[in-house]
Image: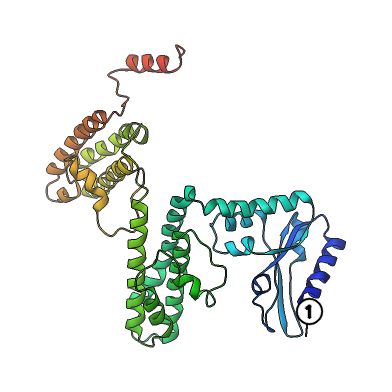
Amino acid sequence: MLNVFEVAKTLVDQVEKVYAQDIAIIAYYGSYAQGTATKRSDLDFFFIPASSKGYEASVQFIIDGISFDFWPISWERAERMASFEESQTSIIADCKLLYARSDEDRERFMKLRDMISSMQSSENKQRLVEKAESEIRNVYTHLYKLNRASDSETITFYRTEAYGVLTKILQSFALLNGKYYTKGFGKNKDQILQLPIQPARLAAYMETIMHSNVHAEIVEACDQLTADTLALIVAEREKYYGSPSYPDRLKGFYEEVKGLMDKIITACEMNDYDLAFFAANHVQDLVAAFLFHAETGQWPSDYVIDLSYQDFYKQAGFPDLVDLLHSHDLSPLREAAERLSVRLEDHLRAKGVSINRFEDIEQFEVFLKQRNGGFV
């Protein structure tokens, strides 16, 4: 039986002879690192190049029926794995070092493991929740294809797209729980089902997605799993809402958005419905998003399917510009945009936001002189 570690020694010897200054780290991961290898297990290697020449050491091969992949990971990619930007965090966290070019390289690698521990601390919980939400973006292409598919598509199509949904949702769960998977998909079901934060019907959804032969059942399970995951993410996000703070979060905002509100007024005066349509939608959404940020310290989620993030906009009594878009008569929209401009300024001033408004250039020059310590 092949001793895979003799293969590892051969590779390390070759590196020391040919690439001594070009490869910083060699390590292995996977089943041998975790003590779960079988007779058919390969030895999963990676190395971190120290120069462009180091990448030339990459090689894939088979010995005695066992496959090997000696593949490069840049320091930058290793850092992305350690910071949970990429899903293979376990490669860095659980690997065994075979070679380090220097003490400095070894220390740099160990700092990546410190980064993993730091990312899992309570101080970084909010960042991981945000990463979990970002992971959901990758689900929607698969959902779109599943929901738009014709009845003629094969079960292979549905399972392939459902696989895309499931793996990305499961990665989102890992981030939501501040964890990384120690084993690959297909081997990590126990760890998945033990995660504290998960949908109540996760096991049932997985069962349907993986075993059903009925197209509609697979699509429904994917849709429900995604919806339940989003509900969990939104609930976790809300735990990190901060106290309202307008002066720092909305500094300079009114001065910028006023030009957009003026654009609505101009469009209405010119009876330019196209411009009015885009400007009105943009302004209302922008103002609502910034008010939400001022109140909570977070930006609205892209995945909340209603307009609840506009509640602060409505509570302030601001007009619904979008509802007033009527191609036959833009005068109500113009009046609403004028009201919004005045009310938003008053609202922000009442919240302590300083707004730089000047009657003439002389006032502006005085402002600049004061801001610059007497020099203009």
Instruction: Give the quarter of the figure containing the N terminus.
Output: bottom right
Please state which amino acid type lies under the numbered disc 1: Asn
Q: Quadrant of residue 161?
A: bottom left
At 76% from the left edge and 59% from the top edge, which residue is drawn? Answer: 54
Q: Position of residue 150 (x, y in %)?
A: 34, 82
Vertical placement of residue 89 versus 65, above or below:
above
In the image, residue 161 above or below residue 376: below
125 and 308: which one is in front?
125
Looking at the image, which residue sits at the far top? 374
Q: Quadrant of the C terminus?
A: top left
Residue 199 in which image quadrant: bottom left
| Residue nearest the observer in this picture, 317 or 173 | 173
Question: Residue at image x 50%, y 71%?
Answer: 191
* Viewer-proximal residue among 111 and 339: 111
Figure check: 150 above or below 87: below
**Percent of width and height locating residue 201:** 35, 74
Q: Is residue 156 left or right of residue 254?
A: right
